[in-house]
Amino acid sequence: MAHNCHLDSLTQDDLSALIELFTCPRARQYLGGPITKQLATQRSHDWIKRSSAEPIWAIRALLNQTLLGYVILDKHHDESDIEISYALLTTYWGRGLATQALTQASRLAFFELGLPRIIAETQAKNLKSTALLERIGMNEERRVFRFGEEQIIFSLHNPSPPMIEQVGASPLS
């Protein structure tokens, strides 16, 4: 598969597209629904500020650098795992871009950040996301009922974990 996107830091130029992504009912259907424009603006500014230092990536088109969506690594609800989350603007759905972006982000999580594993949580009824997570090699680990819906938690383990683990060190602390 040809690569059509890459991961990069978010910039101020991404502000309106991020706000659109956070407020779009269709894009947020399985992510708790759209948030208010005010909250979306605050979150967008925060993510842009944090993007150069934390694992919050813009998914960009290779040809013109357009923002297509985002990928983020952050602490999961259970506080013991690192979760990979993503969203794409609906215009870019169905083109394999999320598969490419999550594959790139997983490699960064393992080979640059040295994480031993990552997880993803999605609603059981979100069949496209479930298929995507399986496509990138994630395996169903367990099911939970949260946010009023059945959720599936998937995991992916580092194919070459570090020989020596640093006790107490975390790239996301």
Image (cartoon, rainbow, N blue to C red):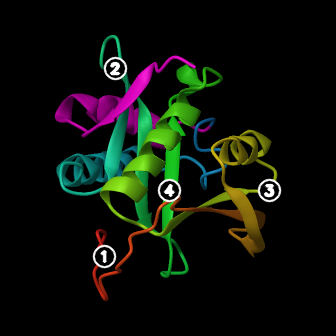
Marks 1 and 2, Cα distance to the nearest angstrom? 31 Å
Q: Residue at x 51, y 41 (%)?
A: 103
The first of marks 1 and 2 along the sequence is 2
Q: Secondary structure at mark 4?
A: strand
Q: Secondary structure at mark 1?
A: loop
Q: What is the CA distance from the residue labelled 1 to the residue labelled 4?
A: 15 Å
Image check: 54 left or right of 35? left
The boundaries of the magenta stretch are 1-25
Tell me the number on the disc at residue 124: 3
- Identified at 37% across, 47% down, the residue is 40
Q: Residues within 10 Å of mark 4 (few under 14, many from 20)?
A: many
Does the magenta run of residues contain 9? yes
Q: Residue at x 50, y 56 (%)?
A: 84
Q: Kindly report the distance in space between the C-alpha atoms of the residues bearing marks 2 and 4.
A: 22 Å
Q: Report the amino acid beneath label 2.
A: Thr
State the residue position of label 4. Answer: 84
Measured from the top left, where is residue 157 in percent x and y? 57, 64
Q: Position of residue 145 (x, y in %)?
A: 77, 73
